[in-house]
Image: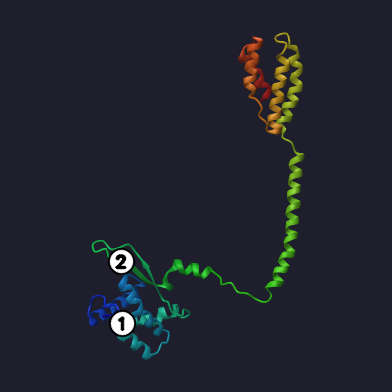
Amino acid sequence: MRHGKKVNHLGRTDSHRKAMLANMATSLVKHKRITTTLAKAKALRKYVEPLITKSKNDTTHSRRTVFAYLKDKEAVTILFREISEKVANRPGGYTRIIKMENRLGDNAEMAFIELVDYNEIYGSKAATEKKATRRRGSSKKKADTTEEAPAETDVTASTEEENKDSSLTFLDVKPIMKMIGFFIFNGFLGRLSYICNAYRTYVSHLIIYSLSMDLFNVYPINPINIVRAQAQRCGMPKKILTWIYMVVML
């Protein structure tokens, strides 16, 4: 029975397992990220992180100890010169394991293991985030900010009132021009009263409808339909009456 035995043998002998982990640790130190199975990645993390901690103390004894595990002079040099400076302020947790899709063929669980400080994407986010700290003078600062806030709100309120006043004082030019045209053209319509007695009143109603639509955004009835209905009652051609209405409205 295997009670209490946490070491994953990975289906290999002891010598084979140590040689494989040494090669994987060397590749991780050189390339900063490798892809392997999830079980091997977890075993490699336990193997390589104590070596990275050892590299923070750059002595001859530490270099010889790490070389006994890695068995690669170039990897030892990179570990003690480059990686040790990167991880100087990190108290452990030098690697990150991220799962991937299962491998085609045997459906093995795959993952890649990388050095945390060499990932630019996650590293930039961690650098921008600031740690929230509490200080004794925070209550006074909050009181000052609360006093300044009403003054800012008063300024914004005054500017909004000025904008409202300016919007009320200036009217749209188009409805006013229509009204002037209505009074000018009303005398001309009186001379055409012999064609139809109710012509003047209905066209004046149409102009009032159009003014209400522009001034108050009210759309009671479609004016063109009123023109056509009145033309049928008076016996006047629709095209002439519609043309006169469009000249007045434009």
- Coordinates of residue 105 in the picture (x, y in percent): 23, 62
Q: Label 2 crowding class (10 Å Cα cut-off): few <14, some 14-19, many 20+?
A: some
Measure how far apart labels 1 and 2 are at the Cα level.
26 Å
**170 or 19: nearer the viewer:** 19
- Coordinates of residue 50 in the picture (x, y in percent): 38, 82
Task: Give the quadrant of residue 9.
Answer: bottom left
- Coordinates of residue 160 in the picture (x, y in percent): 73, 49
Given the image, on which type of amino acid does mark 2 rest?
Glu
Q: Quadrant of the C terminus?
A: top right
Q: Is 80 rendered above or below residue 151?
A: below
Q: Which residue is mark 1?
A: 70
* Element marked by disc 1: helix
Q: Which residue is mark 2?
A: 109
* Element marked by disc 2: loop
- Coordinates of residue 221 in the picture (x, y in percent): 65, 25
Q: Is 156 rendered above or below residue 67?
A: above
Identified at 61% across, 14% down, the residue is 238
Given the image, on which type of amino acid does mark 1 rest?
Leu
Q: Is residue 236 left or right of residue 144?
A: left
